[in-house]
Image (cartoon, helix red, strand yellow):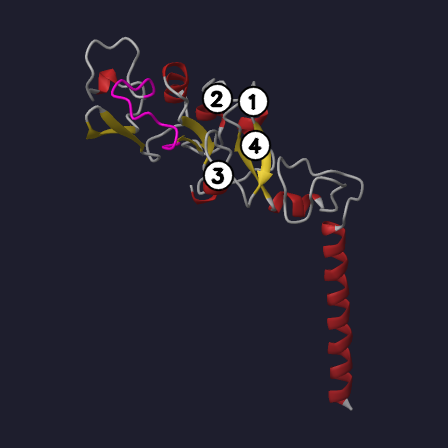
């Protein structure tokens, strides 16, 4: 008899705990019919042709912050407003667009007298761009993300004197995906938005499918 009472007690307690857990999950993940997620692209739940049934929590898990290079004005706030000690925003080089110039506007200061790799000639304040000779007259420029602070000076130089192959992007191996991104909050051009986590990069001049491997 005692074993039977113990079994019933355990069964009832387990049932109550399960019910409480399910109720909590429902309250947290309940749908918000009639609202639209606002993602700048398709996700696995929505084709943007109707209202989104995702809860805010589910929406947040399926999206990340990203910077639209076409809106970026290289104001420098990505380097100073991020909660990370070194900003999660880094310069990304779109090699498909690069002209492999000897006189690179993103690498060299505009007023230099001779082209060289001397630190005083480089536009980047942390020497985060490496210049490598390919063949006459072409050079390749590689970003050292461990040194890049996301200031955007190289991006501005490349856009002014080149073809814009240097672009700022939020790197998701560093971003902590804050609920309210401090850079987005202070971005004067409103270049930040939530994008699908399945397509986390927004680069100009490149097939977006190929950005998933960046």
Q: Position of residue 55 (x, y in %)?
A: 72, 46
Whether residue 198 appears in magenta in the rendering, the answer is no
CA gap, disc 4 and disc 3:
10 Å
CA gap, disc 3 and disc 1:
17 Å
Task: Give the residue drawn at x 73%, y 77%.
Answer: 10
Describe residue 188's horizontal placement relative to residue 26 as left or right.
left
Query: Relative to 66, does residue 164 appear above or below in the rendering?
Result: above
Q: Earlier in the sequence, mark 1 or mark 4?
A: 4
Q: Quadrant of the C terminus?
A: top left
Q: Quadrant of the N terminus?
A: bottom right
Q: Position of residue 31 (x, y in %)?
A: 76, 48
Q: Which residues are magenta?
A: 94-106
Describe residue 74's horizontal placement relative to residue 128 as left or right.
right
Residue bearing the label numbered 4: 181
Residue bearing the label numbered 3: 175
Q: Quadrant of residue 5?
A: bottom right
Q: Describe the element under mark 1 as helix, strand or loop.
A: helix
Describe residue 48's horizontal placement relative to residue 125 as left or right.
right
Q: Earlier in the sequence, mark 4 or mark 2?
A: 2
**Could you tell me if the residues under marks 1 and 2 are in contact, i.e. CB atoms within 8 Å?**
yes
Task: Give the residue drawn at x 33%, y 17%.
Answer: 105
Q: Describe the element under mark 2 as helix, strand or loop.
A: helix
Q: Describe the element under mark 3 as helix, strand or loop.
A: loop
Whether residue 102 appears in magenta in the rendering, the answer is yes
Query: Relative to 123, does residue 176 appear above or below in the rendering?
Result: below
CA gap, disc 1 and disc 4:
9 Å
Q: Earlier in the sequence, mark 3 or mark 1?
A: 3
Say few, some or many: other residues with alpha carbon within 10 Å of mark 3 (under 14 / 14 to 19 / 20 or more): some
Q: Earlier in the sequence, mark 3 or mark 2?
A: 2
Q: Earlier in the sequence, mark 4 or mark 3?
A: 3
Residue bearing the label numbered 1: 186
Residue 77 bears which disc, if any? 2
């Amino acid at each position: 008899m005692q074993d039977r009472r113990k079994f019933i007690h355990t069964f009832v307690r387990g049932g109550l705990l399960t019910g409480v857990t399910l109720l909590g999950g429902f309250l947290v993940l309940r749908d918000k019919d009639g609202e639209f997620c606002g993602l700048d692209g398709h996700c696995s739940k929505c084709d943007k042709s109707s209202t989104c049934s995702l809860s805010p929590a589910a929406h947040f898990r399926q999206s990340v912050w990203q910077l639209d290079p076409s809106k970026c004005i290289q104001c420098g706030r990505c380097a100073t407003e991020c909660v990370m000690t070194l900003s999660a925003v880094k310069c990304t080089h779109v090699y498909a667009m690069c002209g492999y110039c000897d006189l690179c506007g993103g690498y060299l200061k505009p007023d230099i007298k001779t082209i060289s790799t001397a630190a005083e000639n480089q536009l980047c304040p942390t020497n985060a761009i490496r210049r490598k000779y390919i063949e006459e007259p072409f050079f390749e420029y590689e970003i050292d993300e461990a040194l890049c602070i996301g200031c955007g000076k190289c991006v501005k130089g490349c856009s002014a004197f080149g073809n814009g192959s240097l672009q700022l992007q939020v790197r998701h191996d560093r971003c902590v995906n804050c609920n309210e991104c401090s850079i987005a909050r202070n971005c004067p051009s409103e270049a930040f938005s939530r994008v699908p986590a399945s397509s986390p990069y927004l680069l100009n001049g490149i097939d977006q499918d190929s950005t998933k491997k960046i």
